[in-house]
Image (cartoon, helix red, strand yellow):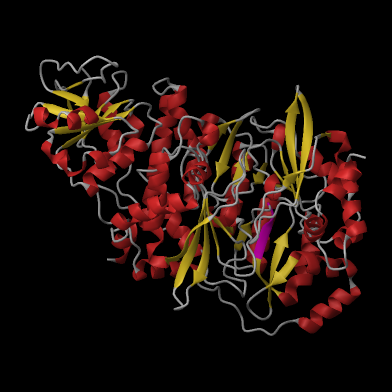
């Protein structure tokens, strides 16, 4: 079970499991306990999954948040997969979910989640980070706070530095 | 020029501390090589053929004398006492030690410099015209906007892991383009609309490299305050849809081509509609804040020194040639723009010693309000020199090796470091540049040939901008041997064009002869007022081909 770091740097373990996409011809098998299923399967079986507080979804990096849209708030957890930490599409997915579709619940980074990207993730709206198990979760807090301020507006602030300077 | 405030200083310090921590973790094995790679690249650190290479950012080419002196000291203390000006107006050190890099970055931060995002798949240093603010035909000074883009793109949380590197250039002159904006991922041409409002014409998807392309216009007029929201929309579309499966098809130009410029523009406009009024939209106060750093220096009220200069030029032919080629008109009476040539034959183009960096600093203090500018042609500009002191400055430049009066001629070669230094290169480029410079050592002949851009790259990554050279030279590897392919007709200015390949490639020792034969064709066929490029465009490729392959 991976360590999950919160935006404030605290470490917890929880029992949300990520359900991989079933192979062709196989159907989705839900495990015991809360789980995250591929977002397109949740959308396809919406009438079946709607209203369950133990089922969330995960986006792969090529999937489009537009397809979920404002229905995101029906979900307790939305996760975004980083197949490789250098695949930056997940940052845009996160910002769109938060800023365009006003998603309020937990937004979790999963996959190749390393320490040095945590602050970028936080700034884009992620508030839970399933750190890759070989990395030291105790360093999470430092890495979430390398920088004490930022030049740009993002999900975390409406005040780019040029607006703070002007005030 | 821009001066850091407390916010910039704090961010710079935190960045150094972050990289120190990352370097420590890389050296003790907590960070794997591939995990450290993008972190060090985004701090300017490559691992090269012979040693690490550190690319230091010179934002839009502007340097203060104290920064030049610090760079000189760094090259002495941490390197071999020289540095290289690049075609993106940055400065490279070729021999730093990995474990010293955090200390070098700390020394740079002391003088408001850094190496942020000079490499890696992120938004790189924004470049502009080295004559910004001192020429008389610019729409507005582009540097405040470059600084606005620099700050917006620095540590941008959404765009640190793009499909590929991303370069932005801004041009403000109506007559010419000294920033080659049409071969950038985004090229911004400053314009005024019919109502007189300031804005940008937006080119996207230009670039050199493996698939050279001139960037099409996706928006004719973008109001100035919408600059950042529109850039954010372009970058978001690129971040989401740019190809990540193939490094060679990952630049934004491939996406623009695949979607067509119209299709790409539609996607950007749709995204922009959502964010155009977001807090990222600039305010008039914000623009004014940045403009205050780029006000005029304390010019004296002078007359043009026409009589004095005429007399000096009449009595000294070499000075006359230098004024013709290396001095440009300044918007203020009595002042001139001086370009120091870093293209002296026998010195790799763009290379300077520690001592020379200090000499440039001294000259900047003495003659140009303490500022200097790097150009993408790898020369250095003193932008505010009094005309009545030009002769005195020239006499000082000559023994320092900066007065070669060859700007914009055949021997003002743009040249990458090539196979002598670069791990990516297929072939050496510096010896080719030198052999051509030696062959064309008669200045009178060079002047007679007029303006010719000769650009040399050691591989198809095109750091030497060979595609947009009037004559372009590309190093290629043929079964382990170095050969050189020539292209003709490239142009990096307002009528940007990619050159066409002449034919089969040549051995290195043949290159000066081949160039000489191409030049002979021009000399025979030209009309009185034609440049090399004009003649090529009129007569086409065949006469050149026939001569060279005869």
B194 in relation to A104, above or below: below
Instruction: Please give the name of the residue rendered at 80% of the width and 35% of the height, measured from the top-left corner.
Output: B505
Answer with left or right where residue A96 lies relative to residue B268: left
Q: Residue furthest front?
A: A25
**Residue B410 on image: x %, y %:** 81, 53
Between residues B494 and B63, which one lies in front from this camera angle? B494
Answer with left or right where residue B179 lies relative to residue B420: left
Answer with left or right where residue B546 lies relative to residue A160: right
A45 in relation to A15, above or below: below
**Residue B397 on image: x %, y %:** 77, 60
**Can residue B183 be spotted in the picture?**
yes
Q: Magenta-highlighted stretch: main secondary structure?
A: strand
- Report the label total: 0
User: Is residue B289 in the magenta section?
Assistant: no
- The answer to which quarter of the image holds residue A71 is top left
Answer with left or right where residue B355 lies relative to residue A126: right
Instruction: Please give the name of the residue rendered at 42% of the width and 44% of the height, measured from the top-left corner.
Output: B238
**Can residue B1 be spotted in the picture?**
no
B425 in relation to B205, above or below: above
Q: Quadrant of the C terminus of chain B?
A: top right
**Residue B99 on image: x %, y %:** 51, 30
**Residue B47 on image: x %, y %:** 57, 29
Between residues B266 and B83, which one lies in front from this camera angle? B266
Q: Which residues are magenta?
A: B378-382
């Amino acid at each position: 079970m991976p360590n999950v770091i919160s935006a404030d740097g605290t470490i917890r373990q929880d029992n949300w499991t990520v359900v991989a996409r079933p192979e062709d011809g196989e159907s989705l098998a839900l495990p015991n306990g809360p789980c995250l299923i591929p977002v397109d399967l949740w959308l396809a079986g919406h009438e079946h999954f709607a209203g369950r507080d133990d089922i969330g979804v995960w986006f792969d990096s090529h999937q489009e948040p537009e397809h979920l849209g404002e229905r995101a708030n029906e979900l307790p957890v939305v996760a975004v997969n980083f197949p490789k930490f250098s695949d930056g599409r997940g940052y845009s997915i996160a910002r769109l979910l938060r800023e365009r579709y006003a998603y309020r619940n937990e937004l979790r980074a999963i996959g190749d989640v390393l320490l040095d990207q945590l602050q970028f993730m936080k700034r884009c709206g992620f508030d839970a980070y399933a750190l890759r198990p070989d990395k030291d979760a105790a360093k999470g807090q430092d890495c979430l706070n390398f920088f004490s301020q930022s030049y740009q507006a993002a999900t975390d602030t409406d005040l780019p530095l040029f607006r703070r300077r002007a005030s | 020029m821009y001066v850091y405030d407390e916010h910039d200083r704090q961010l710079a310090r935190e960045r150094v501390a972050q990289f120190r921590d990352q370097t420590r973790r890389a050296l003790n094995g907590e960070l794997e090589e591939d995990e450290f790679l993008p972190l060090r690249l985004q701090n300017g650190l490559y691992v090269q053929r012979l040693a690490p290479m550190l690319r230091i950012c010179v934002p839009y080419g502007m340097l203060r004398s104290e920064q030049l002196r610090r760079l000189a000291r760094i090259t002495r203390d941490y390197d071999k006492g020289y540095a290289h000006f690049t075609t993106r107006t940055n400065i490279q050190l070729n021999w730093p030690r990995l474990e010293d890099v955090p200390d070098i970055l700390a020394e740079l931060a002391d003088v408001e410099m850094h190496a942020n995002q000079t490499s890696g798949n992120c938004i790189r240093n924004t470049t502009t015209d080295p004559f910004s603010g001192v020429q008389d035909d610019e729409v507005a000074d582009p540097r405040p906007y470059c600084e606005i883009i620099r700050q917006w793109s620095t540590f941008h949380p959404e765009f640190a892991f793009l499909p590929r590197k991303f370069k932005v250039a801004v041009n403000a002159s109506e007559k010419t383009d000294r920033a080659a904006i049409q071969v950038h991922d985004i090229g911004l041409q400053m314009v005024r609309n019919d109502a007189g409002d300031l804005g940008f014409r937006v080119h996207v998807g230009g670039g050199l490299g493996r698939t050279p392309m001139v960037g099409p216009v996706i928006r004719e007029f973008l109001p100035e305050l919408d600059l950042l929201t529109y850039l954010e929309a372009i970058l978001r579309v690129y971040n989401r849809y740019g190809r990540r499966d193939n490094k060679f098809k990952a630049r934004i130009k491939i996406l623009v081509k695949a979607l067509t410029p119209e299709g790409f523009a539609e996607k950007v406009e749709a995204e922009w509609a959502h964010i155009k009024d977001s807090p990222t939209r600039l305010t008039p106060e914000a623009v004014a804040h940045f403009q205050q750093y780029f006000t005029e220096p304390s010019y004296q009220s002078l007359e043009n020194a026409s009589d004095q200069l005429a007399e000096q030029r009449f009595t000294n032919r070499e000075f006359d040639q230098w004024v013709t080629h290396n001095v440009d008109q300044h918007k203020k009476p009595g002042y001139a723009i001086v370009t120091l040539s870093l293209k002296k034959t026998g010195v790799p183009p763009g290379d300077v010693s520690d001592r020379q960096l200090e000499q440039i600093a001294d000259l900047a203090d003495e003659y140009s309000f303490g500022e200097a500018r790097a150009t993408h042609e790898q020369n250095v500009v003193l932008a505010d020199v009094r005309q009545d002191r030009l002769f005195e400055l020239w006499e000082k430049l000559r023994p320092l090796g900066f007065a070669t009066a060859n700007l914009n001629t055949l021997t003002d070669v743009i040249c990458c470091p090539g196979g002598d230094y670069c791990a990516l290169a297929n072939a050496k480029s510096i010896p080719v540049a030198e052999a051509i410079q030696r062959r064309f050592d008669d200045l009178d002949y060079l002047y007679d040939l007029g303006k010719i851009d000769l650009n040399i790259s050691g591989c198809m990554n095109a750091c030497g901008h060979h595609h947009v050279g009037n004559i372009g030279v590309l190093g290629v590897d043929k079964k382990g041997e170095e050969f050189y392919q020539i292209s003709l007709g490239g142009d990096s200015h307002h009528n940007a064009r990619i050159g066409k390949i002449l034919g089969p490639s040549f051995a290195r020792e043949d290159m000066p002869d081949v160039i000489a034969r191409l030049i002979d064709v021009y000399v025979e066929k030209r009309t009185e007022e034609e440049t090399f490029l004009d003649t090529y465009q009129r007569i086409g490729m065949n006469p050149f081909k026939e001569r060279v392959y005869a």
